[in-house]
Image (cartoon, rainbow, N blue to C red):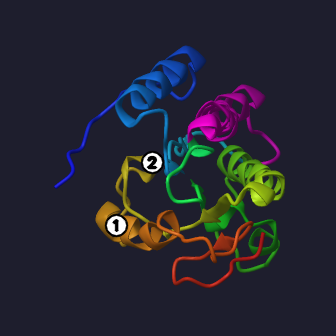
Amino acid sequence: MKSVKFVELDITKVDTILSARDTISAHTGGKLDVLVNNAGISNLGKDQNAKSVDVALIRETVEVNLYGLIENTKAFVPLLRKSTTGAPVILNVSTDMASNSYQAKSTAPFHIVAYNTSKAAANSYTIALAHELKSEGFKVNAVTPGFTSTKLNFFAKGGKTPRDSAKVLLPYALLGKDAETGLFIGPTGEQFPW
């Protein structure tokens, strides 16, 4: 049985990301098979209307949801290149609200400017990363587990539990060499529109 070790990092502080990477590297022989980028903030409860949103709020949200994801990914790619599987995985946890195609529909219920913009930008980064790392055998995808009740949304009623959402993510964290890359996957395994 394998043991679980916890390493703390602050996704907005590169020095803590690098420290976490070095700690993990020391315990794994410099190798990593899977990186799941799940850190995020929503800033729900603050004005995120397109006509009146404070740009400082957008900056704060992008700092975590995009820049932190990028810094974390850059730090761990060297360990992933030494993966023992031959098909290292980068899985970025996304949201249906990051899909411009979905958000453009008249039925889209939530236009939360800072959150949606930051996650849509993270999706764009996922696409670029998938293209750049494809020749090295990386599997880089975004998955939206669907509405989940967490601290991010003040534990809103009616959502999945974090455990149920983790079950949605798990198959995409354990992809093999023949799996696809560069996909946005919805909560039931369907390809979601970017």
The secondary structure that most of the magenta stretch takes on is helix
Residue range (magenta):
50-79
Quick one: label 1, few (<14), some, or many (20+) residues within 10 Å?
Answer: few
Mark 2, secondary structure of its residue:
helix
164 up-or-down from 41: above or below: below
The amino acid type, in three-letter code, at marker 1 is: Lys
**In-front residue for pair 24/112:** 24
Chain-order first, disc 2 or disc 1: 2
Query: Residue 182 falls in which quadrant of the image?
Result: bottom right
> Disc 2 vs disc 1: which is toward the camera?
2
Is residue 26 within the magenta segment?
A: no
In the depicted view, which residue is nearer to us: 84 or 128?
Answer: 84
Task: Tell me which corner region of the image, top left, top right, bottom left or bottom right, holds residue 78.
Answer: top right
104 left or right, relative to 78: right
User: At 76% across and 53% down in the image, what residue appears?
Assistant: 133
Residue at the disc numbered 1: 157
**Labelled disc at residue 70:** none
The residue carrying mark 2 is 152
Q: Residue furthest toward the left?
A: 1
Circle 1 sits in a helix, a strand or a loop, which is it?
Answer: loop
In contact (CB < 8 Å): disc 2 and disc 1: no
- Which quadrant, please, contains the N terminus? bottom left
Query: How crowded is the residue under tag 2: few (<14 C-alpha within 10 Å), some, or many (20+)?
Result: few
Name the residue nearer the viewer: 44 or 96: 96
How far across and down, in percent of the image, does residue 45 sit?
52, 44
Q: Is 184 situated above or below 117?
A: below
* Residue type at tag 2: Leu
